[in-house]
Amino acid sequence: MAAADPSGAGFAQRAAGIAGRNSDPGDRLIYHRLPWEEPDAPTDFAILFEDNNVLVLSKPSGLPVLPGGFFLENTLLHLVRKRYGSTSSPLHRLGRGTSGAILFSRNAPAARSLARAMFERRILKVYLAARRLETRINPPRPPTRA
């Protein structure tokens, strides 16, 4: 395994080589990226409970909790911190496609206490699923014995 190059010269040499020449000491690599285009996501969420330490929110389906992929600002974390301050943090996550209640701490002591309670299983995360049943006109019959 090659050692890391803290000067970045190896990267500059590879990048310059792509451009068709070798790099020289002092060369700079300039990268222009296209403007960020974040996908749309729901931005409304309901407050189920709120006090000075805890928020319980109703996360809609389609809204990621944490930044990732193409999502940075269209996340529940960003929206909550914009409204409640930078010390707010989720105690767990729900997948982007999942809707449901999510617990946020509003300060560091609450985060430690709630994280400990989750670790000790005094707070549990439970998933409930709904299923639409279809009625069959001719239900299958079990096999008959000969």
Image (spheres, rainbow, N blue to C red):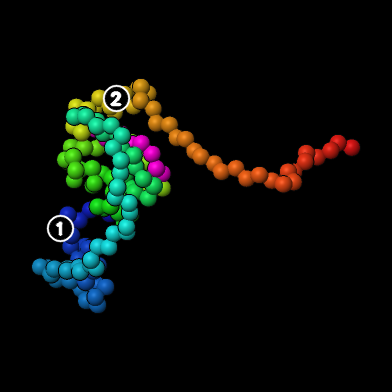
* Image quadrant assignment for residue 117: top left
Look at label 2 and name its amino acid: Arg
Look at label 1 and name its amino acid: Ser
Q: Which mark is residue 116?
A: 2
Q: Which residue is mark 1?
A: 7
Q: Report the residue at 21% width, 71% height from top.
A: 16
Task: Tell whether position 87 is magenta.
Answer: no
Image coordinates for residue 24, horizontal then vertical, percent: 14, 71
Frontmost residue, 135 versus 55: 135
Does residue 32 appear to the left or right of 132 in the view shown? left
SS at badge 1: loop
User: Which is nearer the N-term, disc 1 or disc 2?
Assistant: 1
Frontmost residue, 69 versus 60: 60
Q: Which mark is residue 103?
A: none
Image coordinates for residue 139, horizontal then vertical, percent: 73, 43
| Residue 23 sits above or below residue 51 on the image | below
Does residue 144 appear to the left or right of 110 in the view shown? right
First to last magenta residue range: 98-105
Which corner quadrant holds the C terminus?
top right
Q: Report the residue at 22% width, 63% height from top.
A: 11
Furthest residue in direction right, as rendered: 146
SS at badge 2: helix
Regarding residue 130, the answer to whether it shows in the image is yes
Disc 1 and disc 2: Cα gap in Å? Answer: 42 Å
Furthest residue in direction bottom, as rendered: 20
Crowdedness of circle 2 by 10 Å Cα count: few (<14), some, many (20+)? Answer: few
